[in-house]
């Protein structure tokens, strides 16, 4: 049983590292960004509520996201653990998670300076079908423009343009950053230096998790 939260700025590498943890620990990646983009694509009620916020680089209202996560965590595949990627992003979201009775084993905080974030998000390519992420220079797919995992075409996220990135970073610093102290106070926070090659970051993330649960991976 391993319930993990990945914390970090937009573009810190949460999605990228979540994919690696999934492979090692065989627990699902729950990305609120991916769930919201799927809801928008399918035109659901929640997707319609979310769209204007996502496109403007702002956070979707807490109650909408909390409801999505609550439903997702009730599914069977979460029984042996899960990786929350992009949730919680505000203190009220973290409190809601506690109120759901969810125990968290570790919060991995991936630290990357703002200057690097701009370059990362500028070169990001995403698979809207399976949620995998790539970077044109630093983490390219085997075939340009095509997802390694599912073969679908890759796209550029509409919110990965410079003006929107700046707004997302501003919101990260004001709303999400306080979660570091929140989880430090609960003795759950593990800080990882994220401004290194993907493999180096993964090695630190996995060793932090294995030290908590040596039997699982
Ligand atoms: P990032 O690459 O910035 O970490 P995500 O894919 O996690 O982006 O999220 C994309 C967008 O979806 C966010 O900018 C926000 O509008 C919305 N979103 C995702 N997760 C949350 C959340 N926990 N609370 C509010 N909004 C969220
Ligand atoms: P997040 O989920 O935190 O928004 P992603 O995992 O989508 O971040 O990563 C953002 C971009 O940076 C992607 O294009 C990804 O391929 C790239 N990336 C992720 N980790 C690294 C790393 N350690 N070094 C260089 N590029 C990275
Ligand atoms: Zn894919």
Image (spheres, rainbow, N blue to C red):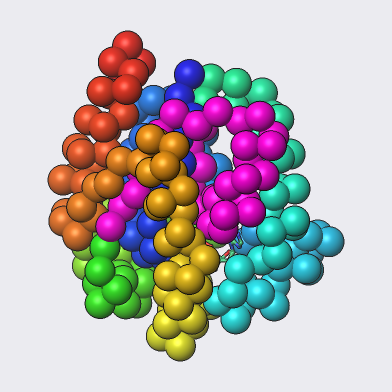
Q: Position of residue 189 (x, y in %)?
A: 36, 41
Q: Position of residue 29 (x, y in %)?
A: 50, 39
For the C terminus, the quadrant is: top left
Asked if 23 appears above or below 110 in the picture, the reply is above
Residue located 38% across and 57% down the image? 8
- Number of marks in the image? 0
Identity of the residue furthest to the right in this view:
45
Asked if 191 appears above or below 217 in the picture, the reply is below
Residue located 66% across and 23% down the image? 76
Q: Position of residue 170 (x, y in %)?
A: 45, 77
In the foreground, 146 or 43: 43
In the foreground, 208 or 216: 208
In the foreground, 39 or 188: 188
Horizontal side of residue 51 vs 160, given as left or right: right
Q: Is residue 184 magenta?
A: no
In the foreground, 42 or 168: 168
Residue located 50% across and 53% down the image? 86
Q: Is residue 89 magenta?
A: yes
Q: Give the image quarter of residue 96.
A: top right
User: Does residue 211 appear anywhere in the picture?
Assistant: yes
Horizontal side of residue 84 vs 213, given as left or right: right
Identity of the residue furthest to the bottom in this view:
163
Horizontal side of residue 174 vs 114, given as left or right: right
Identity of the residue furthest to the top in this view:
215
Residue located 26% across and 23% down the image? 211
Horizontal side of residue 77 vs 49, given as left or right: left
What span is in magenta? 82-111
User: Does residue 140 appear anywhere in the picture?
Assistant: no
Q: Position of residue 56 (x, y in %)?
A: 60, 81
């Amino acid at each position: 049983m391993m319930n993990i939260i990945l914390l970090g700025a937009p573009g810190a590498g949460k999605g990228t590292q979540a994919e690696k943890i999934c492979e090692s620990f065989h627990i699902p990646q729950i990305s609120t960004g991916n769930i919201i983009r799927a809801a928008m694509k399918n035109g659901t009620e929640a997707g319609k509520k979310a769209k204007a916020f996502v496109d403007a680089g702002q956070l979707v209202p807490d109650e909408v996201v909390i409801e999505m996560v609550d439903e997702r965590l009730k599914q069977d595949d979460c029984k042996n653990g899960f990786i929350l990627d992009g949730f919680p992003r505000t203190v009220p979201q973290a409190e809601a998670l506690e109120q759901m009775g969810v125990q968290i084993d570790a919060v991995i905080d991936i630290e990357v300076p703002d200057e690097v974030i701009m370059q990362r998000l500028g070169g990001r390519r995403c698979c809207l079908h399976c949620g995998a992420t790539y970077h044109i220079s630093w983490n390219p797919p085997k075939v340009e423009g095509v997802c390694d995992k599912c073969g679908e075409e890759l796209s550029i996220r509409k919110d990965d343009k410079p003006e929107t990135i700046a707004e997302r970073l501003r919101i990260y610093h004001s709303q999400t950053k306080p979660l570091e102290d929140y989880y430090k106070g609960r003795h759950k926070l593990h800080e990882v230096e994220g401004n290194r090659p993907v493999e180096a970051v993964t090695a630190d993330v996995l060793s932090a998790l294995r030290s908590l649960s040596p039997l699982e991976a």
